[in-house]
Image (cartoon, grey):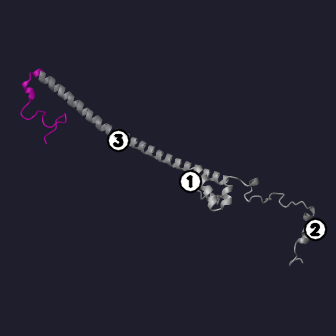
Amino acid sequence: MGDENEDGNEGDGNPPGGDPLSRLDEATAAWVRDRLHKARQEAKGLRDRLKAAEPVLEEARKAEEAKKSEAERNAAMLKQLDERANAAELRAARIEVAYAKNLTPAQASRLVGNTAEELAADADVFLKDVLGSAAGKQGDKKPAGGNPLGSQPLRGGLNAGETDDPEALDPAKLAASVPRHGLFG
């Protein structure tokens, strides 16, 4: 390799075999040399600017990749939230069908289907197969008074022990009915 000249080219800038400008008159040759020198200077300036711009370009590429990565993360999060929403809707539909068919939570957890209609159909099959044909015929009907045991009256709350017979609640009679074995008797 030869020596580089001020324009960054090797040698004297002339092709082997002589100077092609030697065939031109002095004024034209000077003009061509001046233009060539300016073009080389401009090219050198552009190369320098390109080298200075490469780190900025690399940062821009990295930022673009980061945006893509962020968009991909957002898409994955959106998919996950959508799956969670679908699962919650399915649980709500299962609970609604179980309530309508008078199923316990344990029985409701066994229902299979992706829609309320599929869950209701599965509940009907469950009632028919597992609980017997009487419960299957009952289907959507709730027992009278909302009592899952049917017509058997339920008592509860503050007045659970009330009876129509006031003597049944007489404290003396109640105390006398308690057996006295052991401690005080």
Question: Disc 2 versus disc 3: distance between alpha carbons?
Answer: 97 Å
Question: Disc 1 versus disc 3: distance between alpha carbons?
Answer: 52 Å
Q: What residue sits right under mark 3 in the picture?
A: 58
Name the spot of residue 12 as percent of width and height, x first: 12, 34
As shown in the figure, which amino acid type bears the numbered disc 1?
Gly
Based on the displayed image, in which of its 4 quarters is residue 53 positioned? Answer: top left
Q: Which residues are magenta?
A: 1-27
Mark 2 burial class by Cα count in 10 Å: few <14, some 14-19, many 20+: few
Q: Quadrant of the C terminus?
A: bottom right
Tally of numbered tags: 3
Q: Earlier in the sequence, mark 2 or mark 3?
A: 3
Mark 3 burial class by Cα count in 10 Å: few <14, some 14-19, many 20+: few
As shown in the figure, which amino acid type bears the numbered disc 2?
Ala
Residue 20 is inside the magenta segment = yes
Q: In terms of secondary structure, what is the magenta stretch mainly?
A: loop
Name the spot of residue 56 as percent of width and height, x first: 35, 38
Q: Nearer the viewer, residue 86 or 84?
A: 86
Residue 102 seen anywhere in this rendered image of the structure: no
Q: Which mark is residue 48?
A: none
Q: Earlier in the sequence, mark 2 or mark 1?
A: 1
